[in-house]
Image: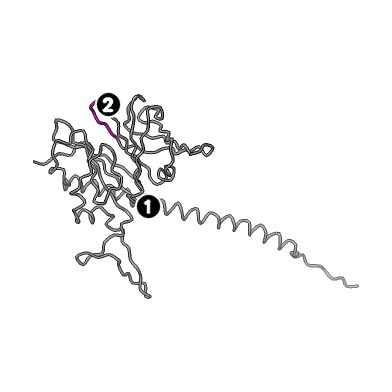
Amino acid sequence: MQTTKRSSGITLLEVLAALFVVSIGLLGVLAVIPFGAIQVSKAQHAEYASNMLANATAEVVIRNMGIESWDKVTYKKFIWCEPYPIFDSPTHIVHVPRVEDRDDWKDLMRGQDDLAYNTYDDKRPEFKFWKDGKPLSSGKYTWFFTYLLKEGEDTVIVDVLACRNRVQSDDLQVHVPKESFAAAHRGGTFTFSNGNNIVERLAQTKYVFVTWQEGSTLNGAWCKIVVLDKDERSTPRNPKIVVTGSLPSTSDYDIYVYIPSGVLYHKRVPDVPIRK
């Protein structure tokens, strides 16, 4: 009598189980891809802005951009140099009007390889903005600077700021009373007690400009936001920020906090000579 030997194989149930396991793994991989793309995009923005900041700092120092033309009556005044309209000028800060008339500065204070273009059907670039036969940047990346003339010296302290998607009309200035400022070593904590979309404004930037008056002396500093917190239980919301920077060591002073939009990086040049 002849018997038939059964060959071992894979059942349909085993195939379905394997497909289920593989699909779970693929879903995990697909979930990582968008997160990775976001991180790559952030890294590209950071690299571009930091490179632009280095170039901008060199431009200010080498060109001595307007520094030699300002009078020394601006002692202890912070000069804001930006070739675009300032809608809400910071208290105690002098915005130099003549800068707005410098068209060459407007072109210079943009990311020089931040080009905006359309494409033809054959994917050739068609640049949107032109000047003197050359394509201009889209204006997504820009920079500006502030400076303080050092009293009794022929040098200035320059702070250069690199920005992405800066919109000056989104700037906001807030008065912070003594009880809302907690001094700390090389920094402090501010608690804002009003609305005006402060949380949204603070989320648009990494730096704020702070000024305070000690007797007859005006002081100020650019400070980096290291923590942004808000109390959702209160109405209106009371956002709180923790910053690093050269702030007063006590909480004896009323402070003005100027919140610019889109500031990513800051670099200080302590002693830039004034050309005679």
State which quarter of the image contains the C terminus: top left
- Total numbered labels: 2
- Name which of mark 1 and mark 2 comes first in the sequence: 1
Name the one closer to the observer, 245 or 46. 245
Q: Quadrant of residue 243?
A: top left
Give amino acid for label 1: His
Read off the magenta span. 215-220
- Residue at left 43%, top 33%? 191
- Residue at left 36%, top 25%? 251
State which quarter of the image contains the N terminus: bottom right
Give x and y (percent) for residue 233: 54, 37
Give amino acid for label 2: Glu
Secondary structure of the residue carrying numbered label 1: helix
The residue under label 2 is 214
Q: Extreme bottom residue here?
A: 121
Name the one closer to the observer, 101 or 5. 101
Give x and y (percent) for residue 78: 23, 38
Q: Is residue 40 above or below residue 231?
A: below
Give x and y (percent) for residue 142: 29, 52
Give x and y (percent) for residue 35: 50, 53
The residue under label 1 is 45
User: How packed is label 1: few (under 14 Cα within 10 Å), some, or many (20 or more)?
Assistant: some
- Residue at left 26%, top 36%? 92
In this picture the colour scheme is: one colour
Principal SS element in the magenta part? strand
User: How packed is label 2: few (under 14 Cα within 10 Å), some, or many (20 or more)?
Assistant: few
Q: Is residue 55 above or below residue 115?
A: above
Q: Is residue 43 above or below residue 224?
A: below
